[in-house]
Amino acid sequence: MFKPDVAFYLGEQKTGGYSGIVSQDNLFFLLEVPSGMSEEAGHKVLDFVKEKIRAAQIDSLSALENFIISVIKEKNLPTGFSLSSAYLKGSILYLKTSGSGEIYIRRKGKLGLLIENDSTASGPVDDGDFFIFVTENFLNLISGRQGLEETFDHRSPTEIIDEITPSLKAKQDQGAVALFVNLLQVYDETTVGLPSESDEMPVFSWKDRLVSFRQYLASIGRQKTLTFITVFILFIILLWSVVLGYQRRTSAGAMNKIKLAKELVTQKLSTAQDVAFLNMSRALVLISESKDVVAKLNKDVGKRKEVTELEAMVKETENKILKKEMRKYSEFFDLSVDDKNAGGDKIYLDGKTAFILDKKRGVVYQLSLEKKSLDKNQLSEIKSANLVAGFESESFFFAKGSGVYRVGSDGKSKKIIDNDKEWGEIVDMYIYNGNAYLLDKGKDEVWKYPRGESEYGSKSSYFASGQSIDLSGVSSLAIDGSLYLSGDSIIVKYTSGLRDGFKVDLPDDKPVFNKVYTSRDLEKIYLWDKSRGTVYVLGKTGEYIEQVNSEILSKGSDLIVFQDAIYVLAGSKIYKVE
């Protein structure tokens, strides 16, 4: 357990304001109200805090936050107040600051800022940890952090106050307040691993055992064999008791580490769930910190049942926060009903119709996702196709080295865009409002071809002047009015040719995007990482919503999304992931 050595500095009360501290029942609370509170009202606030902490059950960071929030609301603190607070639970310290509140720590001779402004934190404390609770007002009075560092010099809290008081009183110290807390570990008979008068057997050192045995050997000539055997057996029993005692203390120490780690991980995961909705990045940091705690515990105590349970708890919370779950899939349609040798390479959706490229057989299928009815166009030119698209009832395909073709309602193909020597490497195609867009990663361009009454017009760059980026790692294109490009770990958005302030915060490191999918009919963006078997689902402004995991997502060759269901093309079959 830890015993706090506490001292505080309190300047003159500011007219119309109030400053004060509470150090009671393991709560350390510092309050500064610059204006809008009388000294009498301030005393009532602190009395309220002292009374409330006696009945409070604070066992997590969120519990401390709720306690502070209840004080602020119930006592209707004026705007502009600042506070620094902490609560010690066992060996875990929970901290919260508001306004210009700041909390510093000196550990092993080094001073560092823990939190400031509107922040929270928590963690285990060490013997000798020195915490300083201040506000900006006090820091300015002692020349900031440098003044703090010069003040310490390994002094106790009381010695620090004695040292700084004369110089601060000579200044304008109205409203200045600071709380110094040195946590010192103390032991009692309940401390794990320490002997007490209630122990059944005193714990002797190995040296004691060996000395006793040598004394016995010195007199062995005068004792009978039976006595030797008896004493030797007793020695073995005593030696064994030492081993058992060591094992018992080792086991107790391990269980104590497990208990502390569980408390820390539980509060981190609880906080992660509380903040996930408004601050996903902070929730992910807390999950990562929880994993680090469990990893260190595993290293310290080995693979125990309790550690495995803690790992499972972290994983379960992570999946819950990230809305991460394994989804089942079912077969939606099999192209082999048309031909047993059928197989899909690419799939494209326009409205309710999926356009599927079977390059080997030179076929573009049109599959109604609502009616499950199948039509097809089979042409020799399609055997050289690399990409497929569709618009209304017409199919489009791109053939490398040849150009773009359109297949009309009569089943005949017509080249609408000739092969262009200025092209680099065309890797994707999209038809939007009838206009054709070609993703050329070799030339860092998206070429736009406007649709005319009988033929397509000349190409132009989609990008506004100076807006193009390096597209060498990009492989996928989607349009919903804005234009999205993805590949490797890249996802960018353009609107009217201008780069959009589109920022994505995904839970996994270095995802590899095989495809970006969205349309004007969808309210979400879908990013497919085939290597992970995952589709990340985002809002149209880039906010993370959830991730879909399914075994089929790591096996398909292409996918589309229709009415919030994912359709995966794998060979001759199309699978549906709800």
Image (cartoon, rainbow, N blue to C red):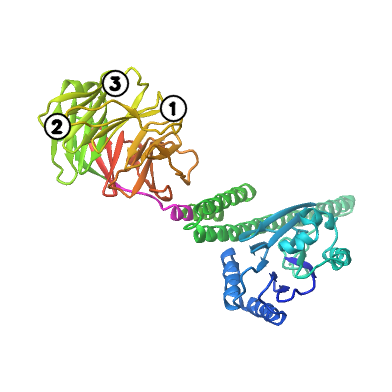
Q: Nearer the viewer, residue 124 or 458?
A: 458
Neighbor class of circle 3 (other Cα within 10 Å; few <14, some 14-19, many 20+) is some
Q: Residue at x 17, y 24 (%)?
A: 414
Say what secondary structure mark 1 lies in: loop
The residue under label 2 is 376
The residue under label 3 is 400
Q: CA distance from mark 3 to mark 2?
A: 22 Å
Task: Give the position of the N terminus as an image quadrant.
Answer: bottom right
Q: Answer above or below: position of 550 versus 194.
A: above
Q: Is residue 131 left or right of residue 508?
A: right
Say what secondary structure mark 2 lies in: strand
Please check the rendered image and state whether residue 326 is part of the magenta-colored stretch, yes or no. Answer: yes
Residue 323 position within the rendered picture, expressed as x and y whole percent measured from the top left: 41, 53
Question: Which residue type carries mark 2?
Answer: Lys
Magenta range: 317-329
Q: Earlier in the sequence, mark 3 or mark 2?
A: 2
